[in-house]
Amino acid sequence: MQETTTPPPVFVARGVSKVYPMGDTEVHALREINLELYSGEFVVLLGPSGSGKSTLLNILGGLDVPTLGTVRYRDHDLTEFDDAKLTRYRREHVGFVFQFYNLVPSLTARENVALITEIADNPMTPEEALALVGLEKRMDHFPSHLSGGEQQRVAIARSIAKRPDVLLCDEPTGALDVGTGIMVLEAIQRVNDELGTTTAIITHNAVIAGMADRVLQLSDGQISSVEKNASKLPASQLNW
Amino acid sequence: MRAIDRKLVRDLFTMKSQAIAIALVIGCGVSAFVMALSTMTSLNTTRAAYYQEQRFGDIFARLKRAPNALADRIAEIPGVLRVQTRVEVEIILDMPDMEEPASGRLISVLDEPGHSLNEVYLRTGRWIDPAKPGEVIVSEAFAAAHHLHPGDSFRAIVQGNRMTLTVAGTGLSPEYIYEVRPGELLPDNLRFGVMWMAYRQLAQLSDLDGSFNSVSLQLMRGASVPDVLRRLDTLIAPYGGAGSYTREDQISHRMVSDEMTQLRAMATLPTSIFLGVAAFLLNVVLARLISTQREQIAMIKAFGYSGREVGLHYAKLAGSIAFTGCVAGIAGGTYIGQSLTRMYSRFFHLPVMRHEVELWQIAVAILVTLGAAGIGVFKTVRKAAALPPAEAMRPEAPVAARITWLEKFGVLGRLSQSKKISIRNLAARPLRTLLSIVGISMALGVLILGTFTEDIVNVVLDTQFQRAQRQDFSLALMEPSSEDVLHDLENLPGVGRTEVFRSVSTRIRSGHRWRRVGLMGYEGDRVIYPVLDMDMKPIAMRDDGILISKTLAEILHVRPGDSVQVEVLEGRRPVANLIVRGLVNDFAGLSAYMRIEGVWRLLEEGPTISGAHVKIDPQQRTRFYREVKNTPAIAAVNSKGAMLQSFRDTMAENLLTMKLFNVGFACIIAFGVVYNSARIAASERSREFATLRVLGFSRQEVSRLFLGEVGSVLAAGLPIGLLCGYGFAVLAVVGLQTESQRFPLVILRSTYAFALSVITVASVISSLWVRRKLDKLDLIGVLKARD
């Protein structure tokens, strides 16, 4: 990707720090992070546990606010948003995929997706979203009757069904075996390709970095390196 | 249906046993509320309509004999709308289906129906034909007890005249909704009945031609009642007027009103207890649900549901449980109310007895329930709404356990690790533990409250009939007579010991406060009728002052040593100031006692008696009955055995029904509290229990740990529950106390034991029910899941 053709950034983070009080001490989860994410970009954030990956993702997704610094989403300063505005931001623009799927066990696959499409402005139908992740035949199953990979694909369908601008994935394959993990990554890649959704995956699995446009390495709350992949690998060619 | 609502329905289904347990507790509270309130208003409305249609009087008075012309002067009293004069006499009845004599009250009516106050409501047959001698309308209850139908006849002694009365019809009267023999609390329709006869006939029989001995007034709106009473008393005094009184002192009216007061008390106390317990249960159950659904909440919020929507979701969940319970309660309350109304129709004789639940009562029930539920879950729902999504995604921090002071000070000695776990767990959530304990104690309290009434009845029976009233019969004379009559009574066949009394109608006054009270004069030396107070001690009569009941003293604001004005309402109507020599804590409402000699002095008359309590030789019973029926001087005969039997019959059935309801209610509370606490403990600690199992603890050991905690709560709750039960009983005795009835506070040890065992059994069953789940712990699954 050429610098000159780079579209305007979706996210711009400047001097973002996050400090959690923990008993009598303070934990510095993020230390003065600067970062841009561009439209349609596929970014992988790599780093060991406690490096601040999830905190960064939560801040970008409007789940958390930084202690210091600013985060801009297009024309908006997320750090200025109150709770109601953050909720609206999430409702309209952000899709999440979590390590532990976080499906509602009492709802079927279709209903889990419907839970989100019902509050979105211009969603796909739950059926379309589930077809996109290859689950059209398992739509009326409850999470307890789905495998881990299937559950994660429902979670992906749920997050992309509202056609979000950004898809934020927190260790989406963390609880899955290789084969299933790859199926899930394929689904994410397909969404990124076909819908042009800006996608960020955080993981401590370095192999996944191969499918990204850019790879950010985090350690101890700071971005330690940024790499651009000359060519992206399809998810099916990954192995770990 | 929206997906989020579908989640709600399925969540409810998953927690159905807990939801049902809570809904049942709410249902109990609401049904008590609806039952009491609807029955009370139905009774009130029905009575008011009946009073209006039959023109029930506002003021009543008895006198000896006054010419009918006096009625015109009474009508001139300002505020009086209508005057109804009549003749009213006590009679002895010789019923063909009964060996012992019954008594009755014969009241005169106009030749044509539809014009008088206190109009008789004709139920069967026809109005009396004044031309046919001995025709009467008989009260429906008495007719039913004796299977009397129009055309039947029976023998009676009316003012010394033996005669035959013929039933023209049966009827009801607003004056006798509660048809009870004067001086008694419970009706005995077999032995006492009211009947109505044409004025001319009755006046002739009682030698009251052209006169009357009873008057009833209807007042204009806004009339000054005290003024009318005073003027009426002045007018009737020369004719032996015994003091006028209002509806509030009219026995039937007062008994119905007292019942309504008691219903009002029932609508508040039990309802508050049940809804309080329900609020607590909703709180713990919802708090637990929200904590297990933290990640779902996080996800839902991450995807853009607002805090308000999440809060509303959980509020709806609690609301649907509350609403379901409330609807069930309204249905249950309506049903119980109908049964209660049916039971009332056996005591209260109204032309129609319809039970209706009004819309506003349903609205209030729903509001109160939702209000209680709201109080219970408000904080929890707000917490769910405010839960930051990023934080919710992390598992909840472990509850901060610490070494409890119980352990620190070695109060509990050296403890095994598992006991430490139990104690620290309970101590880590002090509020919940405390509320569980309160819940258990409430259940026990409610049960004691519901069953101790039986103890009261037993004690009252024991006091009244075994110790206080050892006579076989009480004989009341037609009018106070000289002591010579005593010899006649003593000469009746089989009569052994005889103890006489003189009763006199009085108005006892202190300052502007006054009450109409029957002053009883007794002999100093009594054996078969000792008159006991609530502590079973014989009351020692004085002739230098009076003893009055505690309730009366409270109403009059007097204490022993104070003086009260006693205004005699008969004879020469003397007025005297008497010193209150003591307070009597007795069962009946308002009473006043003196030595009989003191009464004679007060009356300024020689020795007279109103009647006597007698012991008779059982062998001579039949002859005694026969002679009594032939003694014109005797107005009424009360048999102690019959009184006791009727009391037992009426009370036993009611008490059994009440006891069943109360045991059911209390079990529901116990089940609701124990089941829910146990379910929550089991769910919260399934990881811990699974870990222990993985580490090698046996099923039994884990169960013991779990049941140990439930057991500790139970052990703490039961003693407090005993105190609660006692407290509720005190409140009930005070709350149910009316001017006409007072109850001693007695709770027998067997009642405590019964209540303890019911609650223990209910708790053990519910916790064992939950324990089964522990046997099915999925060891691997539980450890893998993030909770």
Image (spheres, coloured by chain):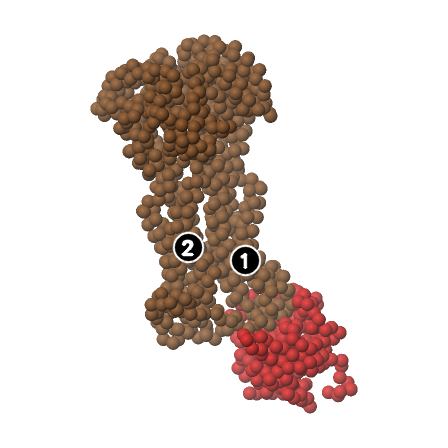
Q: Name the residue under label 2.
A: B440
Q: Measured from the top left, where is residue B77 in percent x and y?
A: 57, 17
Considering the numbered disc 1 on the image, is that residue within a helix, a strand or a loop? helix
Above or below for B112 versus B40: above
Give the chain letter at badge 2: B
Q: Measured from the top left, where is residue B36 in percent x and y?
A: 49, 40
Above or below for B463 versus A173: above
Which sits earlier in the primary sequence, circle 2 or circle 1?
A: 1
Considering the numbered disc 2 on the image, is that residue within a helix, a strand or a loop? helix
- Residue B186 picture quarter: top left
Above or below for B153 versus A233: above
Above or below for B3 versus B597: below
CA distance for labels 2 and 1: 20 Å
> At x 42% / y 16%, what residue is drawn?
B571
Q: In this view, does B704 lie to the left or right of B507?
A: left
- Between B573 and B437, the one nearer to me in the picture: B573
The tint of chain B in the picture is brown
The tint of chain A in the picture is red
Q: Check disc 2 and give the amino acid type.
A: Ile
Q: Can residue B772 be seen in this view?
A: no
> At x 60% / y 72%, what residue is drawn?
B390
- Residue A15 picture quarter: bottom right
Mark number displayed over residue A30: none
Q: Check disc 1 and give the amino acid type.
A: Val
Q: Is residue B468 left or right of residue B42?
A: left
Q: Which residue lies furthest to the left in this view?
A: B619
Give the chain letter at badge 1: B
Q: Mark 1 points at which residue?
A: B377
Q: Is residue B300 visible?
A: yes
- Same chain, marks 2 and 1? yes
Quarter of the image with the N terminus of chain B is bottom right
